[in-house]
């Protein structure tokens, strides 16, 4: 699949020079004292190098062998619209803009190209550590061209990928597609999936699973209702567990499984539900061929956390009086989560790239955001800090409910672990990482991966009192940054001021 690089300025592209993507002016233009034309790009689609399934004609027209000097004629529908616009303009003496063709009419593979282009981060700089070389969780989107070859792709994946593509095109105040069109695309995709789930065949499972993922991400980017994302997450969870763990060992199923895990963890934390992925076969079997990355190991260690937090939320004084040992057991489990996550963070700090980054970070001013060696390192540490914050908050809630039932030594240790200074520090570190995750070079993948950490900090900040000034400063800064960037799903998380 050919994807035009968006980090090359127009001047270097025209002169066929290597561009480092520096802003506001690249190094090539600065050295040669030229005016850098910048990086503003319209949506450009190139025919992806993906063939359709046997017996089906590719919907993307092949490039001509010789360039034509004649300007190609627009499609009949667009030509008619242009003619009407010109007639209106001449009659009223007003210059009318030429409308663009409807996004829902884009060819299937062009829409896949758009989605991959917007969810694939720029190539990471040369790194020496092992963590930076690991595959990111968002790699599921890169299997879309392979899924497009499946016979069921046009029936189920096409409507879902259109919904995601139009949501991308309509994002923000300067969106290139009407929001109403995005909502209509989502409705059509949901109807197509409902029909497919009732008659799903074995060879259609991967396509339908990927279609649900596209709808989920579309809902996160352009929410249609307060519970839309949760509904899609529940459907994705039930569909994923329709197969045995061994099904996800390798190939397309493994890529989809890896891609779904962060979303399913988000759902489990929001709903505070027992999670099947916390059971041993789901943690180990899918990684028997392709071993778990550092991020997957962190998620494996935290999958039992949502259920434990729910037990803390539902605990009443009457229940604790009847079974004081259950309270102590909950406290020990939360403390074990905190120790395990701290151990994983300590191991990650020994990575060569990470150790160099930590040395630089220790010299930064408190008002400077973090700049990680790679998006993978950023996701790893932000996940660890998020799960630690959740466990510490659960511990604090437990102690606030039942301090008299705990022994002195255990209580003293738990209080030390759940201090407000520690939780404020973790929340601040997460916020200092958001600007890096949501930067332009990581496209929409970075913004999507920031959703759960940002939701965790927003909930912590909203319910607490007496937070330190540094946390308050970073919360306000990230809130304004998110609002300015136009990510509707993230704006909804920080829409309420304290």
Image (spheres, grey):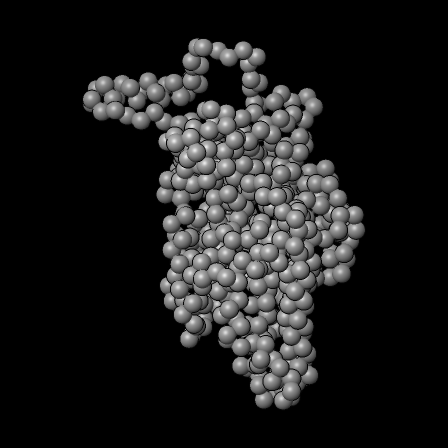
What is the x, y in percent for residue 212?
59, 45
Q: Is residue 187 left or right of residue 302?
A: left
Q: Residue at x 58, y 80 (%)?
A: 416
Query: Which residue is rendered at x = 63% and y = 27% of the image?
Result: 50
Image coords of residue 240 (percent x, y): 68, 50
Q: Give the x, y percent position of residue 337.
A: 66, 69
Number of labelled discs?
0
Observer-nearest of 129 and 464: 129
Q: Is residue 386 left or right of residue 181?
A: right
Res 159 visible: no
Question: How far across and down, in percent of the image, does residue 439 sit?
Answer: 48, 47
Kindly identify the residue that appears in the image at 66 percent across and 34 percent down.
146
Q: What residue sits 67% from the left and 77% below the top? A: 332
Q: Nearer the viewer, residue 297 or 496?
A: 297
Which quadrant is home to the C terminus? bottom left
Q: Quadrant of the N terminus?
A: top right
- The answer to whether residue 35 is seen in the rendering is yes
280 or 287, nearer to the observer = 287
- Find residue 92 and report its image quarter: top left
Instruction: Reply above or below: 239 against 150.
Output: below
* Left or right of 38 on screen, residue 62: right
């Amino acid at each position: 699949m050919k994807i035009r690089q968006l980090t090359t300025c127009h001047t270097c592209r025209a002169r066929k020079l290597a561009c480092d993507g520096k802003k506001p002016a690249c190094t090539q233009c600065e050295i040669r004292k030229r005016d850098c034309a910048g990086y503003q790009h319209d949506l450009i689609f190139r025919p992806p190098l993906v063939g359709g399934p046997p017996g089906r004609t590719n919907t993307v027209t092949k490039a001509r062998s010789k360039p034509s000097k004649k300007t190609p004629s627009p499609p009949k529908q667009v030509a008619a619209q242009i003619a009407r616009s010109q007639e209106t303009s001449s009659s009223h003496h007003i210059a009318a803009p030429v409308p663009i063709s409807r996004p829902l009419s884009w060819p299937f593979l062009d829409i896949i190209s758009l989605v991959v282009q917007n969810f694939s981060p720029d190539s990471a700089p040369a790194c020496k550590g092992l963590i930076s070389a690991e595959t990111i969780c968002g790699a599921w989107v890169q299997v879309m061209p392979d899924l497009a070859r499946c016979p069921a792709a046009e029936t189920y994946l096409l409507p879902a990928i259109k919904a995601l593509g139009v949501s991308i095109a309509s994002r923000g105040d300067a969106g290139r597609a009407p929001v109403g069109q995005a909502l209509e695309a989502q409705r059509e995709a949901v109807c197509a999936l409902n029909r497919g789930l009732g008659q799903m065949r074995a060879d259609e499972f991967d396509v339908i699973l990927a279609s649900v993922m596209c709808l989920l991400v579309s809902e996160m980017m352009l929410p249609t209702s307060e519970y839309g994302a949760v509904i899609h997450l529940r459907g994705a969870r039930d569909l994923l567990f329709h197969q045995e763990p061994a099904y996800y060992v390798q190939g397309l199923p493994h890529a989809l499984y890896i891609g779904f895990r962060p979303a399913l963890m988000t759902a489990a934390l929001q709903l505070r539900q027992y999670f099947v992925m916390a059971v041993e076969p789901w943690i180990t079997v899918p990684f028997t061929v392709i071993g778990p990355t550092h991020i997957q190991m962190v998620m494996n260690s935290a999958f039992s956390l949502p259920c434990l937090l729910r037990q803390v939320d539902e605990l009443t004084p009457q229940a604790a009086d009847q079974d004081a040992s259950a309270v102590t057991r909950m406290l020990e489990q939360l403390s074990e989560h905190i120790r395990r996550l701290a151990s994983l963070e300590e191991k990650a700090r020994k990575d060569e790239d990470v150790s160099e980054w930590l040395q630089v970070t220790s010299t930064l001013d408190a008002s400077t955001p973090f700049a990680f060696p790679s998006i993978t390192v950023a996701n790893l540490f932000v996940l660890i800090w998020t799960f630690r914050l959740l466990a510490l908050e659960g511990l604090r809630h437990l102690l606030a409910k039942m301090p008299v039932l705990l022994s002195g030594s255990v209580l003293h240790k738990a209080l030390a672990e759940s201090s407000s200074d520690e939780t404020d520090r973790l929340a601040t570190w997460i916020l200092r990482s958001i600007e890096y995750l949501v930067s332009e070079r990581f496209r929409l993948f970075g913004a999507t991966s920031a959703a759960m950490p940002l939701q965790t900090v927003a909930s912590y900040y909203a319910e607490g009192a007496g937070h330190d000034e540094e946390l308050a400063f970073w919360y306000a800064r990230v809130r304004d940054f998110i609002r300015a960037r136009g990510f509707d799903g993230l704006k909804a998380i920080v829409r309420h001021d304290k």
